[in-house]
């Protein structure tokens, strides 16, 4: 039987709560986010298979979510593989700005393009801006660091990382858990399910909700299911879709 893949977007972060563009800014979880991670772990623990390998990004909201999940499933001993290529999409000079205020200033259409278009990047950061990843020690000696990204460019690095890491584990009959971010996971979903550029812009991933992929022997999806209460998941998806609307 082919291996299983579980994707989880990190629990609610402090900047999710404040409705700020986060991107690569390294902010922690809220109490709600910690509870979402715990609930995700409880759901995963009820499945009829065990996690063998885990992956996450370089950002602590995802790392801490993974730690909580591993504690809940009593597999804290598993190695954690961190890779910057699973980071959130870089939001350039929008990082730190309030989404609703930005919408009021630039208009809902423009902000929607920056947030959800497939191949349009937000304004780039200057190299001397402290928010540029070149000025962050965790990315030392990494070439090609972005100053801003679209979902299309995010997909390039996510797909590369998938082929070099997770796919190899799946081929070795390992069940994999990846805890990452809304856009890096959307990129992966687009790749796995061959979703169109237009459709993926409307695809919303709530925080802390496990997504289970059943894969065939060629590692192509048989099914994709959000795990948990269906009504709560629908509400959470709508909440994600509403984040950029001005009040």
Image (cartoon, rainbow, N blue to C red):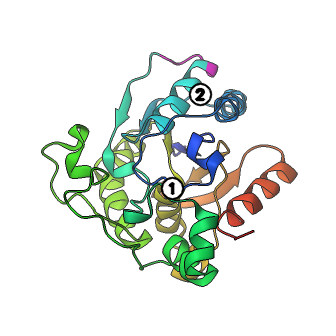
Task: Give the overall secondary structure of the magenta segment.
Answer: loop
Could you tell me residue 56's position as x and y percent?
42, 39
Instruction: Report the residue at 20% width, 51% height from top.
Output: 134
Q: Does the magenta stretch include residue 75?
A: yes
Reply above or below: 172 against 246.
above
**Labels in figure, total:** 2
Q: Does the magenta stretch include residue 234?
A: no
Q: Mark 1 points at which residue?
A: 185
Quadrant of residue 111 in the image? Answer: bottom right
Q: Can residue 20 be seen in this view?
A: yes
Instruction: Report the residue at 73% width, 45% height from top.
Output: 227
Residue neighbourhood size for the residue with mark 1, other residues' Cα within 10 Å, grouped as few (<14), some (14–19), many (≥20): many
Q: Mark 2 points at which residue?
A: 69
The span picked out in magenta is 72-76
| Distance (Cα) linking label 2 and label 1 | 17 Å
Is 172 in front, or is 56? 56
**Helix or strand or loop: what does disc 2 sit on?**
helix
């Amino acid at each position: 039987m082919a291996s299983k893949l579980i994707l989880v977007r990190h629990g609610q972060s402090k900047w999710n709560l404040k409705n700020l563009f986060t991107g690569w800014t390294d902010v922690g979880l809220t109490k709600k986010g910690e509870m979402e991670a715990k609930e995700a772990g409880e759901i995963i623990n009820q499945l009829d298979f065990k996690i063998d390998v885990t992956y996450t990004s370089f950002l602590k909201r995802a790392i801490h979510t993974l730690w909580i999940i591993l504690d809940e499933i009593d597999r804290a001993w598993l190695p954690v593989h961190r890779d910057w290529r699973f980071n959130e999409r870089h939001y350039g000079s929008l990082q730190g700005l309030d989404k609703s205020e930005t919408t009021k200033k630039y208009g809902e259409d423009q902000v929607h393009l920056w947030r959800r278009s497939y191949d349009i990047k937000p304004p780039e950061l200057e190299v001397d801006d402290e928010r540029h990843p070149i000025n962050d020690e965790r990315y030392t000696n990494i070439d090609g660091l972005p100053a801003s990204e679209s979902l299309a460019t995010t997909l390039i690095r996510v797909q590369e990382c998938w082929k070099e890491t997770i796919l190899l584990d799946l081929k070795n009959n390992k069940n994999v858990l990846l805890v990452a971010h809304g856009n890096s996971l959307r990129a992966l979903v687009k790749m796995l399910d061959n979703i169109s550029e237009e459709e993926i812009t409307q695809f919303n991933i709530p925080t802390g909700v496990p997504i289970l992929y059943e894969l065939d022997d060629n590692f192509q999806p048989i099914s994709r299911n959000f795990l948990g209460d269906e009504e709560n998941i629908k509400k959470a998806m709508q909440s994600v879709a509403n984040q950029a609307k001005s009040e």
